[in-house]
Image (cartoon, rainbow, N blue to C red):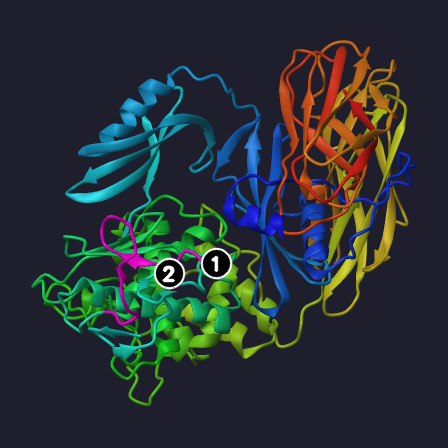
């Protein structure tokens, strides 16, 4: 489908604005218009459930009044789970470290929520340092600057408090190595606040694996080391072009021949691709059916991933290329880390988890290939013997290479490759156990850990870690990996499963501490439920009331009684629930009543459900003046392919618009993903309401949006709707704005 292709191209961009799903309104179409509703499918149900959770600000998904969550993708995974990712913005600025993930299933039930940061409130967006000054400061991170991009203004949420910052990208050389630095310069002080590096070190006749079958392309007398079946996968030299030849026979088996190195590289990444598909349910390296190119011939005793491609050098004695399967799997493992939710964060602890992820995927790929020339062994780089000292790392006992086996408070200041020690150790214990036998090495247990750990096998361990990665946020630390992997084990195998118990025991064995509220491994399945609000916001005049439906669903175990309460009400307002409690699966009506003395303004009301566990959702109440601050336009506008319509509303409200303004939009259109929607204020400023793009078509119906603005309320507000694709048409039935 055309939208599926678009999604692959724009992965990582803000492509779908979050709206609370609602039943489409019964609207009269223009003459001659026909529409065919799209039947719900598991992906659609999962996506709508995730959007509803975000709109309800469920549990971890809280946001400030000036913040907006925008859906950036939905990735299916093993076991029927879906992982919806969201980017956060504050007053229109990207929030770095504000990302969130919602885990849903094919039945449309919310299973988990993760957020990298708390809401940003009251932060000024006026910079005192210029973009040019920030870029100049960013360049000081490198010894030699070869290229740079203009700085952009962002909110940096990594750290104790969010701050306004300029983000610059500079590339070149640092300490004699390639480097692509993302540098964040405090927009108030001009000091470097944070940074991270995209570069992560790290039938053919191959050097390591002999004669192997690899997928290439071409025919006749023109062939290329480009994989025609795995999008984006190719291998060549330092100019980025794939090697070509007059026949489909590649390499000569020599350790110094670069075409031979590409045989080993393609064999490795193609094995990794197939392992991801067959064992972990992931489509391609990037999760959406795509991969990345590889280069060989790097003039360095090194290999790395630079955010766009992998690059492989040679051993110190220059007799072998650094392309054995675990090294190839490691470097493409960095690509997996970057293309799972949260991307690559900052700091040594996050970097250590990233390096450990590379080792884990190298071990998984080596085990999947199970090549007798390089049997699976949980050693990293033993075949290349990079500097003449044997393996680079030992996953079963990191201390053999001088790396820590156990987590401690020193990990955040430990070099990233060494900081991978605890997660490598955890993965080996989870996969093989502390005393696996059968010729496999034993693995030590850290002080205070269990007496032993029983392994699950590498495939199950890989599934659990992939489920954890799918919950990743940009602020990930070891404690987050622990809670995310336990959640994945419960999701995949159940709270009473040996898999859950083994995941917990392995973390205890490497000294990563128990976290408050972490998923619990029990002797019997736990009872749990979810709550959601519809709508998630409402506007009243002082003395009026607003209502919303509070729905619940049993997500595990047996149904239970859930009792409702509300907090955060403005003065003079009360909240009632009818009924006050329900059996999970039932619904209640929330009524918020205000008095004539209730102050105007926007309020976040927290709705709490209390049962065996507590869940919350947020309702945004806007109290306006008695003169009325809601205006509407009920004129029909036909939306044709590749066209734009403008629907105006004239407001007579006084003072400033109460940000965020509330929009209710009713559109009859079978492919909401075709539509880009913007709001133009009286001053002429445009605000993005909804971006186009997605991986399937959904009917638009009635949707509610919250749009941060800085405008006077009076004047003409215009809704601009653009259909950016062909094949689906529709019409705007009506829209309203509450100011």
Q: Indicate the position of residue 601 as horizontal and vertical percent values.
A: 74, 21
Measuring 32% from the left and 62% from the top, which residue is drawn there? 222
In which quarter of the view is residue 639 placed?
Answer: top right
Whether residue 483 is visible to the viewer of this picture, yes or no, is no
In-image side of 383 versus 160 (left or right): left
In-image side of 99 versus 549 (left or right): left
Which mark is on residue 469?
1
Q: Indicate the position of residue 692 as horizontal and vertical percent values.
A: 63, 38
**For residue 434, above or below residue 167:** below
Q: Indicate the position of residue 86 as horizontal and vertical percent values.
A: 58, 44
Residue on which the image places disc 2: 357
Whether residue 664 is visible to the viewer of this picture, yes or no, is yes
| Residue 237 forms part of the magenta stretch | yes
Residue nearest the observer in this picture, 85 or 7: 7
Answer whether labels 1 and 2 touch (C-beta < 8 Å): yes
Measuring 48% from the left and 75% from the top, which residue is drawn there? 460
In-image side of 475 versus 738 (left or right): left
Is disc 1 surrounded by few (<14), some (14 to 19) or many (20+) residues within 10 Å? Answer: many
Q: Which residues are magenta?
A: 231-250
Q: Indicate the position of residue 84 as horizontal and vertical percent values.
A: 60, 51
Measuring 61% from the left and 49% from the top, which residue is drawn there? 2
**For residue 709, above or below residue 492:** above
């Amino acid at each position: 489908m055309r939208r599926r292709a678009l999604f692959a191209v724009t992965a990582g961009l803000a492509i779908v604005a979050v709206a609370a799903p609602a039943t489409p309104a019964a609207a009269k179409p223009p003459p001659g218009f026909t529409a065919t509703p799209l039947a719900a499918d598991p992906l659609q149900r999962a996506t709508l459930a995730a959007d509803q959770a975000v709109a309800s600000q469920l549990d971890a998904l809280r946001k400030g009044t000036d913040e907006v969550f925008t859906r950036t993708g939905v990735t299916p995974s093993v076991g029927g789970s879906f992982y919806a990712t969201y980017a956060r913005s504050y007053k229109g600025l990207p929030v770095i470290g504000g990302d969130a993930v919602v885990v849903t299933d094919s039945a449309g039930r919310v299973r988990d929520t993760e957020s990298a940061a708390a809401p940003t409130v009251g932060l000024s967006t006026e910079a005192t340092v210029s973009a040019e000054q920030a870029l100049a400061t960013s360049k000081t991170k490198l010894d030699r600057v070869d290229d740079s991009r203009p700085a952009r203004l962002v909110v940096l949420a990594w750290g104790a408090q969010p701050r306004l910052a300029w983000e610059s990208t500079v590339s070149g050389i640092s300490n004699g190595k390639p480097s692509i630095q993302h540098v964040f310069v405090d927009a108030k002080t001009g000091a470097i606040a944070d940074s991270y590096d995209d570069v992560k070190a790290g039938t053919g006749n191959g050097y390591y694996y002999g004669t192997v079958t690899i997928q290439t392309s071409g025919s006749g007398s023109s062939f290329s080391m480009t994989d025609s079946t795995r999008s984006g996968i190719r291998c060549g030299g330092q100019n980025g072009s794939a090697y070509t030849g007059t026949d489909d026979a590649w390499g000569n088996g020599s350790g110094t021949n670069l075409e031979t190195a590409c045989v080993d590289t393609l064999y490795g990444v193609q094995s990794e691709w197939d392992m991801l598909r067959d064992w972990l349910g992931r489509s391609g390296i990037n999760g959406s059916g795509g991969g990345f190119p590889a280069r060989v011939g790097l003039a360095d005793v090194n290999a790395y991933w630079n955010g766009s491609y992998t690059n492989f050098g040679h051993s110190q004695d220059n007799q072998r290329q650094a392309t054995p399967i675990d090294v190839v799997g490691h470097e493409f493992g960095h690509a997996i880390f970057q293309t799972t939710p949260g991307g690559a964060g900052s700091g040594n602890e996050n970097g250590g988890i990233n390096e450990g992820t590379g080792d884990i995927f190298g071990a998984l790929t080596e085990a999947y290939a199970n090549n007798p020339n390089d049997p699976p062994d949980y050693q990293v780089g033993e075949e290349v013997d990079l500097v003449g000292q044997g393996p680079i790392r030992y996953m079963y006992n990191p201390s053999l290479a001088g790396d820590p086996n156990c987590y401690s408070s020193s990990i955040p200041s430990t070099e990233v490759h060494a900081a991978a020690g605890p997660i490598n150790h955890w993965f080996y214990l989870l996969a093989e156990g502390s005393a696996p036998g059968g010729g496999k090495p034993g693995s030590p247990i850290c002080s205070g850990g269990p007496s032993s750990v029983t392994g699950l096998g590498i495939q199950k361990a890989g599934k659990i870690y992939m489920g954890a990665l799918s919950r990743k946020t940009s602020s990930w630390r070891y404690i987050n990996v622990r809670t995310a992997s336990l959640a994945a084990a419960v999701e995949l195998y159940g709270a009473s499963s040996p898999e859950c118990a083994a995941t917990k025991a392995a973390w205890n064995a490497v000294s990563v501490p128990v976290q408050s509220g972490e998923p619990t491994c029990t002797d019997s399945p736990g009872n749990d439920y979810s709550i959601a609000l519809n709508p998630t916001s409402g506007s009243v005049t002082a003395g009026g009331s607003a209502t919303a439906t509070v729905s619940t669903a049993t997500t595990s175990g047996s149904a239970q009684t859930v009792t409702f309460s509300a907090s955060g009400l403005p003065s003079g307002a009360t909240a009632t629930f009818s009924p006050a409690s329900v059996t999970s699966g039932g619904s209640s009506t929330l009524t918020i009543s205000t008095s004539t003395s209730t102050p105007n303004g926007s309020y976040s009301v927290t709705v709490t459900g209390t049962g065996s566990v507590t869940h919350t959702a947020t309702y945004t109440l806007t109290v306006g003046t008695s003169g009325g601050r809601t205006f509407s336009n009920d004129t029909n506008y036909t939306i044709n392919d590749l066209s734009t319509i403008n629907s105006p509303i004239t407001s007579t409200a006084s003072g400033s618009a109460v940000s965020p303004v509330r929009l209710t939009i009713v559109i009859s259109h079978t492919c909401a993903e075709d539509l880009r929607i913007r709001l133009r204020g009286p001053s002429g400023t445009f605000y993005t309401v909804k971006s186009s793009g997605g991986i399937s078509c959904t009917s638009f119906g009635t949707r509610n949006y919250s749009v941060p603005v800085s405008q006077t309320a009076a004047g003409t507000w215009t809704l601009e709707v653009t259909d950016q694709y062909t094949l689906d048409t529709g019409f705007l039935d009506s829209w309203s704005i509450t100011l």
